[in-house]
Image (tube, rainbow, N blue to C red):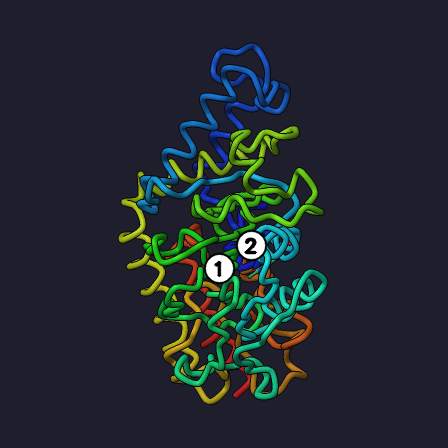
Amino acid sequence: MSRHYNFNAGPAVLPEVVLEQARDEMLEWRGCGASVLEVSHRSAGFQALAQDSEARLRRLLAIPDNYRVLFLQGGAQLQFSALPLNLLGATARADYVDTGIWSAKAIAEARRFGQVNVVASSETSGYTHIPPEQDWSRDSGAAYLYYTPNETIGGVEFQFVPDSGAVPLAADMTSSFLSRPLAVERFGAIIAGAQKNAGIAGLTLVIVRDDLLDRASPVTPLIMNYGLQAAAASMLNTAPTFAWYIADLVFKWLEAEGGMEALAERNRRKAEKLYAGIDASNFYANPVPAECRSWMNVPFTLADSILDEEFLRRSGEAGLMGLKGHRSVGGMRASLYNAMPESGVDALLDFMQDFERHQG
Ligand SMILES: *Cc1c(COP(=O)(O)O)cnc(C)c1O
């Protein structure tokens, strides 16, 4: 069987050249006589990889010198607790924007550690839009303002960076990380699980401004402490070596593809094409207003949900996989991460038109 176009939301499609290189190097890596899976995270070889990959990520996103980059374990959801533990400080109050299931989970977790003020929520309207920034009821004394730039399940994406003023801005970028250029200097802290757009499960990236490294609550577990992990170059405990190695290959691929500007252009084009196809039909629908539609995750429904099973079966036969929507939203979802080629979107659109014709 050949490789399908993979629309899974995460873990998700990887660039084929990354998989090929990992395969070719699997038994023997960089002349060290063993697989990268078998060497110490403290070996000279792995230390070189760690430094190279951080330097490459810094180049890709133009990360300023006063930010630390951490390569951690535990997934994005461990950061839902690590972030408040590290940033709440003495005020113990934080502002959160509630735009979907991932922000709601982050809010529930932060409430274990401090007082959460939900500045705005789109829950009652089914998480299909972003409440206008001028209507947010913010607390000027908040330790940080938190939001989810791309809601992976609802397919809602901020096409702007909120203006948090003097309050540090924190973001869960798991599903949009590395999809476009990023003004890192606007943020206090960024968290991102790697398994959507930056690699595989097991690695979580944290980018945090230096001045926020010294306010962790005393009960913060050592492994979750940003300041201590920064001082230890993310190696307080065994680093997620294989996932880190894959991320390094992905970063190299991104550079070879022309970097963030080139990727953003391609991602915008892919998403616009798919939304245009959905909008042009009376059979498919997406509920999100144009100004906050996600470039990465495109949910859509069929005119009658009774056809969902048939759509999934036939799309699978046509070599299109992973289109089943999240159980909370239903319908379909096509995730269009960096490694999804434009030809995959074309193939999906062809299939959708064909399916619609035959349902009449
Ligand atoms: C997938 C996802 C998560 C969850 O990531 P885990 O690594 O499984 O904890 C969190 N936030 C967003 C925006 C996601 O897309």
User: Which kind of residue does numbered mark 1 sit on?
Assistant: Ala
Q: From mark 1 to mark 2, how far is it between C-alphas? A: 9 Å
Res 87 label: 2
Identify the disc placed on residue 94: none
Q: Residue at x 37, y 67 (%)?
A: 165
Q: Which residue is mark 1?
A: 170
Check disc 2 and give the amino acid type. Leu
Residue drawn at x 41%, y 53% is 338
Can residue 304 be seen by looking at this rendering?
Answer: yes
**Mark before the other along the chain sequence, 1 or 2:** 2
Callout 2: SS: helix
In the image: residue 253, left or right of residue 311: left
Q: Find numbered disc 1 in the image and state the secondary structure of the residue it sits on.
A: strand
Residue 333: % across, % down: 55, 69
Query: How many discs appear?
Result: 2
Q: Is residue 187 above or below residue 70?
A: below
The answer to whether mark 1 and mark 2 are in CB contact below 8 A is yes
Percent position of residue 143, x then y: 52, 62
Estimate how packed mark 1 is, as few (under 14), some (14 to 19) or many (20 or more) residues with alpha carbons within 10 Å: many
In the figure, residue 268 lies in which quadrant? Answer: bottom left
Relative vertical location of residue 23 with respect to residue 9 in this rendering, above or below: above
- With 264 as the anchor, is 47 left or right in this view? right
Q: How many neighbours does mark 2 have within 10 angstroms: few (below 14), some (14-19), or many (20 or more)?
A: many
